[in-house]
Image (cartoon, helix red, strand yellow):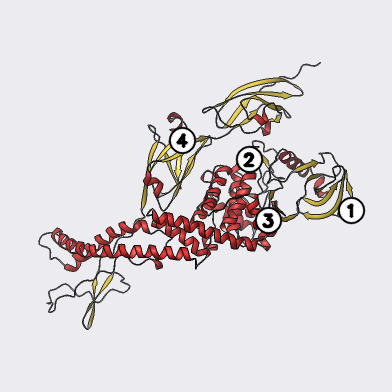
Amino acid sequence: MASLAGSTIDKYDIIEEVGHGGMAVVYRGLDRVLKREVAVKVLHPHLADRKESRLRLEREALAVAKLRHANILEIFDYSGPDAVESYIVTEFIHGMTLKQWVDDKLEPRPAVAAMIIHRLCLALQHAHGGGIVHRDIKPENVMIRRDGVLKLMDFGIAQIIDDQKLTLTGQLIGSPAYMAPELISGRPLDQRTDLFSLGILLYQLATGHLPFSGRNPHEVLNRIADGDYPLAVTVCPLVDRDLEDIIALALASDPDDRYQSVETFGLELARYLDEVGVEATNAELGDYFTDPADYIVRLDRRVCEALTGRAKAAAHDGETARAIHLLGRVLELDAAHAGATTLLQQLRQRERRNRRMLVVGASVLSAGLVFAVAQALPTGDPVDEGQAGTLAHAALRDRVDDDVSTALDSSTDVRTIPTVVPPLETSAPPAGNDAGAPPDPTEAAPGDTTAASVTNPGTTRRKAVTPLPPRVPVTVPCRLAFWGIPLPTAKNLDFRINTETHDLDAMRMDVDVEFAGGSATVRINDNRYTGYRRLTPAECAAGPVKVKISPLDAYIRFVGLPKGAAVACLDGCRDDIIGKNRSASNFPHIPITQGLTQPVRLVIKHIKHETITVSKDLLPGPNTIRVAMSPRADP
């Protein structure tokens, strides 16, 4: 395509080409009427004659023109469907794309990744509120303005929810590396499709690598469909378990297992950032993009101080495992951090004191257990002191392990924690053992690792030890107190604890559950109601954990309307849409503010049909309104 630089399109002087893609070329231009700099996105000539391409450009213009958000590129003008040159005019951004930044300047930091995705969550929350799914979230479609403000752009393949007439059957539209599984398989799309792409971008920004990669697009798509990606912490050790959990929820293959709204995703990122003392503001990101090297030095210092402070609080409250986890995050950023190393030494000293007390008690308890075990063996059977001692030691170790299990978790480096129970020491067998004694177990079977060493003067003997059973992961009991909606409605819902599904009790709103590990997430599974809460052992121990169930915004699917019908809300909707005509296929979501239903009154108009008024009590989530409009009588 010959460059249009130096030419004029309508009232726009085309100055220079600044970018191009498979669909269009972007030029820097000047609006001669308003005397302002603009970006002019012009369709390639070979696409301008295709109806589908022109419809995609028109859809982008119509979809984004109504959006007003600090992090969404603003559209000023559109050529119209019948113009010679098909183009969109937008604000001009002096800066680079996020892809250019990732390729040339990215130094992975989890907090920075969380800030960037949080800002994009806010932009998508605004778009989703208007019924628009972007469908092509990727670094190329995010601009970084010179002052650090992010701008989400290129809604060219955006889907208007409940209106899929322009979707190309059998074709994949978008970037393979950032596609959600439902886009690949052709399943229905909704806002959660964008959340998967955001999860990929979060992973990439936090690690410097894409989660799904392969030798060709087909291999990439297969890995996305299978959910096959390496844990982020194995790619970048700075990624902590908390961010890993957020990424895992966003990248769930089944949309029902992901965050159910971009608002929830954003809130989780905000909580994560709050823990490290960072707020995801445009100004904060401006500092980062203006001077990233200096900002990262200051950010690491802030994060270390915030996490060390939280570790001190956790240690003071007796939450040793959490304190160790937080200190591990600090030492990944600064291996010589004075506050973290000092606190870790104090925790080790505490553990050593506890170990000494346990070992002293063990000496007394072991003797008692040996005697008790010997007494408990069947009458008439020879009592082997080694057998009794081994059983006693196993019981003792299980008891001690239970006492210290709360101090260690899977994230603890076992090299830094002293052994709690020393190896069992048994006395040497008496001299003069006769031939009728049990066989000498000195000759251990090849590969036998269950023998304990027993040292005699001048000799080394081994006595067989019964293998200890494998450790069972510690489970945390928790009582959940659901609230927010009446019991008759709530009892029809179910919820998930991590990946396990549970039913709400038909008789009460309190439910007793268990989960393994240091934390878990509880989520309501429903297309009409939502609820989300992260659980920790400390919260569960303090009493019932409250989980609010809230109704989702209502949205309407109109059936039977003639093409081009307009809908206006007369009562029951947000103030900003009262009395304003909207297309039926893109009518805004309506918050449920009066109990479990929202009464609305709508007026539906069409140039060739009689105007009608519809009153409806909307339920949360999807609603269908069937309409029959009578043709206007001839004048």
User: Earlier along the polypeptide chain: callout 2 or callout 3?
Assistant: 3
User: Earlier along the polypeptide chain: callout 2 or callout 1?
Assistant: 1
Residue located beneath label 2 in the image: 128
Question: Which dot, 2 or 4, sits closer to the camera?
Answer: 2
Residue located beneath label 1 in the image: 6
Residue located beneath label 4 in the image: 493
Residue 302: % across, % down: 55, 58
User: Earlier along the polypeptide chain: callout 1 or callout 4?
Assistant: 1
Q: Marks 2 and 4, Cα distance to the nearest angstrom?
A: 24 Å
Q: Judge the density around disc 1: few (<14), some (14-19), many (≥20) Cα neighbours within 10 Å.
A: few
Residue 567: % across, % down: 69, 27
The answer to whether the residues at label 1 and label 4 have Cβ atoms under 8 Å apart is no
Q: Please give the label number shown on residue 98.
A: 3
Q: Please give the label number shown on residue 465.
A: none
Question: Can the viewer see residue 160 in this picture?
Answer: yes
User: Earlier along the polypeptide chain: callout 1 or callout 3?
Assistant: 1
